[in-house]
Amino acid sequence: MKRNRSNLTSFVDHLDELYGKRGTASREKYEQEFKAFKLGVLLKEMRKQQGLSQEQLAQKCGTTKNYISRIENDASDIRLSTLMRIVQEGLGGRLKLSVDF
């Protein structure tokens, strides 16, 4: 079966249409929120890989189950110091950061 590709749109074009071009306020807001979402998903995956409940992770790093849930479900901003504690004390990992210009 042959597909007609004339009506396909690239993901970047789709984002441009929905949120504006890169550099616009609405696109930057989308990009920032997407990064927060990815962080929550990553933490949840690491927690599950280690067989920890949200409650167990919260106890290991000195926070609450509710806060872990809010981070995993992209409902809360997270401070860098808290993220470091979750990764290092709660999950036994190392946090690496990078800055791109």
Image (tube, rainbow, N blue to C red):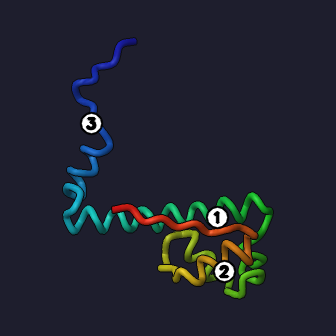
Residue 9: mark:
3
Q: Name the residue under label 2.
A: 85
Q: How crowded is mark 2: few (under 14 residues within 10 Å), some or many (20 or more)?
A: many
Residue under the image location 20 percent in, 55 percent down:
21
Residue 46: name its quadrant: bottom right
Label 3 – label 1 distance at C-alpha: 31 Å
Q: Nearer the viewer, mark 2 or mark 1?
A: 2
Q: What residue type is labelled 2?
A: Arg
Quarter containing the N terminus: top left
Residue 52: name its quadrant: bottom right
In depth, the one of 65 and 96 nearer the eye is: 96
Label 1's element? helix
93 over 49 or under it: above or below: below
Going from N to C along the chain, the mark reached first, 3 or 1, is: 3
The furthest residue to the top: 1
Residue 44: mark:
1
In depth, the one of 74 and 35 nearer the eye is: 35
Residue under the image location 58 percent in, 69 percent down:
72
Q: What residue type is labelled 1?
A: Lys
Label 2 – label 1 distance at C-alpha: 15 Å
